[in-house]
Image: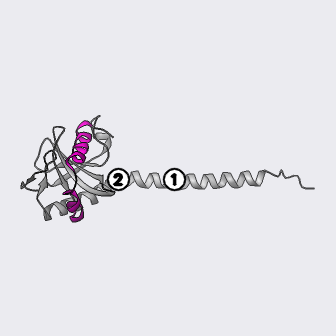
Amino acid sequence: MSSRKPGMPAFKDSLLFSLWIGAIFLAAFLCWFLTQPLRADILKSTVNRNLSERTPSVLGSDGASGGEAAPRLEKFIPPRELESGTFRMGYWFTIKDRKNSKALVFTLAAEGTFLPCLAIVTDKKVEAIRPLGSHSKELFGRLTPGVLRIYIRRIEGGDL
């Protein structure tokens, strides 16, 4: 007769499987957080290239177009360096040649589509929201002012 307990191999198998899944999550977690500066740098160069190609902006509150020069993103601001009460859903950057201004690259969800956008924030007030990309620009024009006001309030109020 065997002295093995009937439930022991099943327990070992489930424990091994759980540890394997945990190791995958740990590896994904480490990759996600350790590569954040690299992802931010790639995002910065992509946004700067996009902004140099198109300069018109859409102002946040009234939707009117402006013709000011395109901002250049300069330095990524890590989440730990942001002051409390800051909108955290996106990437914050400093803007070249502007002291009190920051740029927020975020995704606006509207009409079942995600639109990458750039918000210029000066002294906790949204100065302008710019769509990033031709598809975003096309759909951005069809957004209602109410949707834009919701995102402006979230950014200025630090929600999320």
Compare residues 132 and 34 and report the one nearer the observer. 132
Above or below, comparing residue 105 to residue 138 in the picture: above
Please tell me which residue is depicted at 27% across the width and 40% down the height of the picture. 154
Please tell me which residue is depicted at 28% across the width and 60% down the height of the picture. 42
Left or right: residue 32 compared with residue 148: right
Q: Position of residue 124 (x, y in %)?
A: 19, 38
Q: Amino acid at mark 2?
A: Gln
Mark 1, Cα crowd under 10 Å, few <14 / some 14-19 / many 20+, is few
The reply to whether the magenta stretch includes residue 144 is yes
**CA distance separating discs 1 and 2:** 17 Å
Q: Position of residue 58 (x, y in %)?
A: 14, 53
Residue named by callout 2:
36
Above or below, comparing residue 105 to residue 124 in the picture: below
Write down the region rendered in magenta: 133-157
Left or right: residue 97 compared with residue 141: left
What main secondary structure does the magenta stretch of the protein show? helix
Residue named by callout 1:
25
Q: Earlier in the sequence, mark 1 or mark 2?
A: 1
Disc 1 secondary structure class: helix
The figure's colour scheme reads: one colour
Compare residues 147 and 93 and report the one nearer the observer. 147
Compare residues 115 and 110 and report the one nearer the observer. 110
